[in-house]
Image (tube, helix red, strand yellow):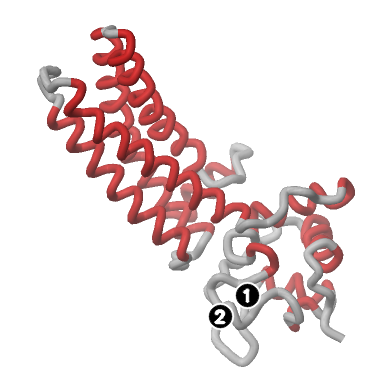
């Protein structure tokens, strides 16, 4: 079922995770709720307080597709791997959903004083900031944004397919097996075999999901290999 959903999106030209397209909605609406409420208090504009309440309600509603697609992406792109950033995002998402539910419940008749809602708006905003931080860590992993121009396309490929589990050339799932000195980088043929059918030496299949040719062509795999070798400082084993 899950594979069928992503195959459909790929068939229409959408090759990226779905969650990022949804996550901006609750984030923006939470920020909007806080901003409108502050202006309503500062300038004494009651109608803006009502706008902030509507923003909060919409944020609550958008949380459900955001969480659903987040779980789907986690299963499909991360193979259900329990990365630290994933755990934190799940915990923070649960807290945010609870805060949104409390805010909607308190204001279900539109009669709750704005000052009583402000702590909830503020806490929700702080949770959103923390979610953004861990989302950035998940994608960038603290890696420097500067990339030589000739490797920028390859860097984008790495960000899409590898950076979640191998930020900076490390290995979040198994820190003892970083990219540096990895036998899978001995040559391009070994590297391609690894990403097509991931295995750990002498063990069963690893938790790394395979990357088939319809997602990453051999040409892009070569660019990715060159990026890992020459930019990330992970030379092949000799």
Identify the residue at horizontal 59%, vertical 37% (top origin).
12
Q: Is residue 110 above or below residue 237?
A: above
Q: CA distance from mark 2 to mark 1?
A: 6 Å
Task: Name, please, the residue furthest toward the bottom.
Answer: 202
Identify the residue at horizontal 13%, vertical 30% (top origin).
106
Q: Is residue 195 above or below residue 63?
A: below
Quadrant of res 197: bottom right
The answer to whether residue 61 is visible is no
Residue 112 at x, y percent in the picture: 12, 22
Residue hosting label 2: 205
Taking 149 as reference, is 100 left or right? left
Q: Quick one: quadrant of the N terminus?
A: bottom left
Quadrant of res 66: top left
Residue 180 at x, y percent in the picture: 74, 76
> Viewer-proximal residue, 26 or 32?
32
> Viewer-proximal residue, 115 or 207?
115
The answer to whether residue 78 is visible is yes
**Looking at the image, is mark 2 or mark 1 earlier in the sequence?**
1
Q: Is residue 92 above or below residue 64?
A: below
Residue hosting label 1: 198
Instruction: Report helix, strand or loop for mark 2.
Output: loop
Contact, mark 2 vs mark 1 (Cβ under 8 Å): yes
Residue 176 at x, y percent in the picture: 60, 83
> Is disc 2 surrounded by few (<14), some (14 to 19) or many (20+) residues within 10 Å?
few
Taking 16 as reference, is 144 left or right? right
Identify the residue at horizontal 37%, vertical 44% (top origin).
127
């Amino acid at each position: 079922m899950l594979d069928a959903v992503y195959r459909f999106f790929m068939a229409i030209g959408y090759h990226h995770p779905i969650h990022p397209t949804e996550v901006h909605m609750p984030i923006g609406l939470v920020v909007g709720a806080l901003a409108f409420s502050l202006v309503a208090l500062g300038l004494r504009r009651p109608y803006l307080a009502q706008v902030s309440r509507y923003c909060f309600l919409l944020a609550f509603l958008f949380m459900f597709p955001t969480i659903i697609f987040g779980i789907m992406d986690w299963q499909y792109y991360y193979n259900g791997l329990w990365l630290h950033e994933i755990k934190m995002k799940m915990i923070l998402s649960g807290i945010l959903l609870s805060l949104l539910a409390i805010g909607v419940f308190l204001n279900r008749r539109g009669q709750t004083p704005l000052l009583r809602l402000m702590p909830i708006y503020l806490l929700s905003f702080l949770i959103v900031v923390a979610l953004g931080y861990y989302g950035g860590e998940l994608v960038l992993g603290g890696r420097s944004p500067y990339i030589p121009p000739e490797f920028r396309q390859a860097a984008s490929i790495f960000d899409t397919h590898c950076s979640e589990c191998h930020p900076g050339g490390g290995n979040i799932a198994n820190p003892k097996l970083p990219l540096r000195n990895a036998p899978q980088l001995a040559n391009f043929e070994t590297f391609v075999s690894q990403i097509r059918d991931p295995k750990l030496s002498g063990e069963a299949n690893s938790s790394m999901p395979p990357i088939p040719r319809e997602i990453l062509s051999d040409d892009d795999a070569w660019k990715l290999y060159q990026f890992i070798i020459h930019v990330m400082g992970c030379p092949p084993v000799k």
